[in-house]
Image (spheres, helix red, strand yellow):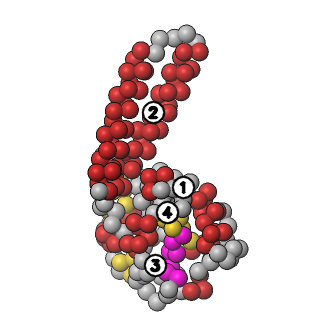
Amino acid sequence: MKIKQNIPSRSYSGIRWTTNKSNKKRLIIDFDKKCAYCDDADKYAGGSKMYHVEHFAPKEKFPELKFTYDNLLYSCPFCNISKSNKWPSESSSINVVGNNGFVDPCSDEYNNHLKRNPDGSIFYLTPVGEYMYYELKLYLQRHQLIYNLERVHKKLKEVKQEIENRKRLNKTVDNLESLYKDLCVVFYEYYNDFFDEID
């Protein structure tokens, strides 16, 4: 499976806003409230207030790109802090040297380097993917748990909607209600594991 279900698309180019706060408002929408690198939904880390504006080419090395929207990403604190100001070259346009570097998660190429196992854990496919996997700490169990929480939550909403639809048509819902209860248990177990992992 792909590491990211949808490749984010930046809605602006160049420098339009000169504060992180202004850029962040747009990034939240462009990245569908998910981390550019690991695809974790921000609601599991305290919402957008806890997420960061990440500079793909680090602003410490390339201050001229500090507010260039094409260089900005919406990132969870785990990926952003792990990546920090790491960069493989002295040029902002050279993001990979040999097997070291970072692929822009807004490109289709990102999914060529990293994937997900059926259990939701992330794994790498290439040497560059391996570099990103370890530098971004994509091996953390939280990424797997959040992926599964989202997946079960989506299924819960679908089943609940189908129950409501069938009730309106006076159709039987016993099997669906049983499935809904089972999914609630699964969601609770992932949720429990997630908070155990944080402690």
With respect to residue 21, does 182 lie above or below? Answer: above
Residue 64 image position (x, y, % from top left): 60, 86
Residue at x 48%, y 56% (from the top left corner): 46
| Residue occupied by mark 2 | 156
- For marks 2 and 3, give the CA distance: 40 Å
Counting residues from the start of the chain, the first of labels 2 and 3 encountered is: 3
Residue at x 31%, y 44% (from the top left corner): 192
At mark 3, the secondary structure is: loop
Residue 114 image position (x, y, % from top left): 37, 60
- For marks 1 and 2, give the CA distance: 20 Å
| Circle 3 crowding by C-alpha within 10 Å: few under 14, some 14–19, many from 20 | some
Residue 77: in magenta span: no
Q: Which residues are magenta?
A: 53-59
| Residue occupied by mark 1 | 33
Residue 121 image position (x, y, % from top left): 31, 53
| Residue occupied by mark 4 | 50
With respect to residue 19, does 47 lie above or below? Answer: above
- For marks 1 and 4, give the CA distance: 11 Å
Q: Amino acid at mark 3?
A: Asn
Q: Is residue 92 visible?
A: no
Q: Quadrant of the C terminus?
A: bottom left
Counting residues from the start of the chain, the first of labels 4 and 2 encountered is: 4
Counting residues from the start of the chain, the first of labels 3 and 4 encountered is: 4
| Residue occupied by mark 3 | 95
Q: Amino acid at mark 4?
A: Met
Residue 48 image position (x, y, % from top left): 54, 59
Residue 151 occupies which quadrant of the picture? top left
Mark 1, mark 4: which one is toward the viewer?
Answer: 4
Residue at x 33%, y 50% (from the top left corner): 194
At mark 4, the secondary structure is: loop
Nearer the observer, 58 or 24: 24
| Circle 4 crowding by C-alpha within 10 Å: few under 14, some 14–19, many from 20 | few
